Image: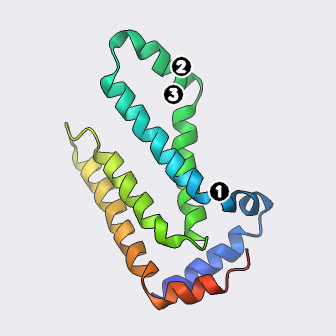
C-alpha cells in the first residue's frame, strides 16, 4: 500500500498543477455521486416510463447530453476523489458504479459482469487502502 500511496501523491501533484482541477476539487463528492445519481435516474426512468414519454427522455438524456455529462462527470469525480482528503468515500462510488453496471439485473452479459467485478474489486482495493496508515500519512501531506 505504501507504493500506491506514493503513486497517489504523484498523481495529486500532477493534477493539482492545473487550475481547473484546483477549482473542481472542493466539489469532488458532488460530481461523483451526482453523476451516479443521474445515471441511475436515467436507467430508472427508461424502465418505468411509458412509450409516449420516451421523446421527453430522449430530449433530456440525448439531445441535451445529460447522459454524457453524468457519465464523464462520474469519472472526473472518481479521479478528483482519489486525489482529495476524502479518499475513503471513493470505494462507495466505485461500488455504486458496479451496481449501476448490473442495475436492471436482466439480460446480463459477460461484459456487464466483468465490468461490475472490476469496479467492485477496485472499490475493495480503495477501501483497504483507505484503512491503512499509508493513506493517513498521504493525506496529511495534502497541500490543497
Local crowd at mark 1 within 10 Å, few (<14), some, or many (≥20)? few
Q: Describe the element under mark 3 as helix, strand or loop.
A: helix
Cα–Cα gap, marks 1 and 2: 27 Å
Residue 45, x across and y down, in percent: 38, 27
Q: Describe the element under mark 1 as helix, strand or loop.
A: helix
Q: Which residue is mark 3?
A: 61
Cα–Cα gap, marks 2 and 3: 6 Å
Residue 140, x across and y down, in percent: 63, 86
Mark 2 and mark 3 residues within 8 Å of each other at the beta carbon: yes
Mark 1 vs 2, N-terminal side = 1
Residue at the location (68% across, 80% down)?
142
Mark 3 vs 1, N-terminal side = 1
Residue at the location (49% across, 16% down)?
56
Local crowd at mark 3 within 10 Å, few (<14), some, or many (≥20)? some
Query: For this rendering, which residue is in front, 13 or 128?
Result: 128
Residue at the location (70% across, 76% down)?
13
Residue at the location (39% across, 74% down)?
127
Q: Which mark is residue 27?
A: 1
Give the answer, above or below, for where 125 lies relative to 46.
below
Image depth: mark 1 or mark 2 in front: 1
Query: For this rendering, which residue is in front, 74 or 108?
Result: 74
Q: Which residue is mark 2?
A: 59
Give the answer, above or below, for where 53 lies relative to 93.
above
Residue 18, x across and y down, in percent: 77, 64
Q: Describe the element under mark 2 as helix, strand or loop.
A: helix
Q: Quadrant of the C terminus?
A: bottom right
Local crowd at mark 2 within 10 Å, few (<14), some, or many (≥20)? few
Cα–Cα gap, marks 3 and 1: 23 Å
Q: Quadrant of the N terminus?
A: bottom left
Image depth: mark 3 or mark 1 in front: 1
Give the answer, above or below, for where 65 lies relative to 83.
above
Quadrant of residue 108 within the rendered picture: top left
Amino acid at each position: 500500500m505504501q507504493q500506491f500511496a506514493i503513486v497517489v501523491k504523484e498523481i495529486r501533484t500532477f493534477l493539482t498543477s492545473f487550475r481547473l482541477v484546483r477549482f473542481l476539487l472542493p466539489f469532488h463528492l458532488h460530481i461523483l455521486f451526482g453523476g451516479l445519481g443521474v445515471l441511475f435516474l436515467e436507467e430508472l426512468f427508461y424502465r418505468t416510463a411509458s412509450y409516449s414519454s420516451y421523446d421527453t427522455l430522449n430530449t433530456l438524456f440525448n439531445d441535451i447530453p445529460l447522459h454524457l455529462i453524468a457519465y464523464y462527470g462520474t469519472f472526473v469525480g472518481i479521479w478528483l476523489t482519489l486525489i482529495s482528503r476524502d479518499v475513503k468515500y471513493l470505494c462507495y462510488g466505485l461500488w455504486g458504479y458496479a451496481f449501476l453496471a448490473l442495475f436492471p439485473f436482466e439480460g446480463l452479459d459477460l461484459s456487464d459482469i466483468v465490468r461490475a467485478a472490476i469496479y467492485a474489486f477496485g472499490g475493495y482495493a480503495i477501501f483497504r487502502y483507505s484503512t491503512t496508515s499509508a493513506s493517513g500519512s498521504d493525506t496529511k501531506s495534502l497541500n490543497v
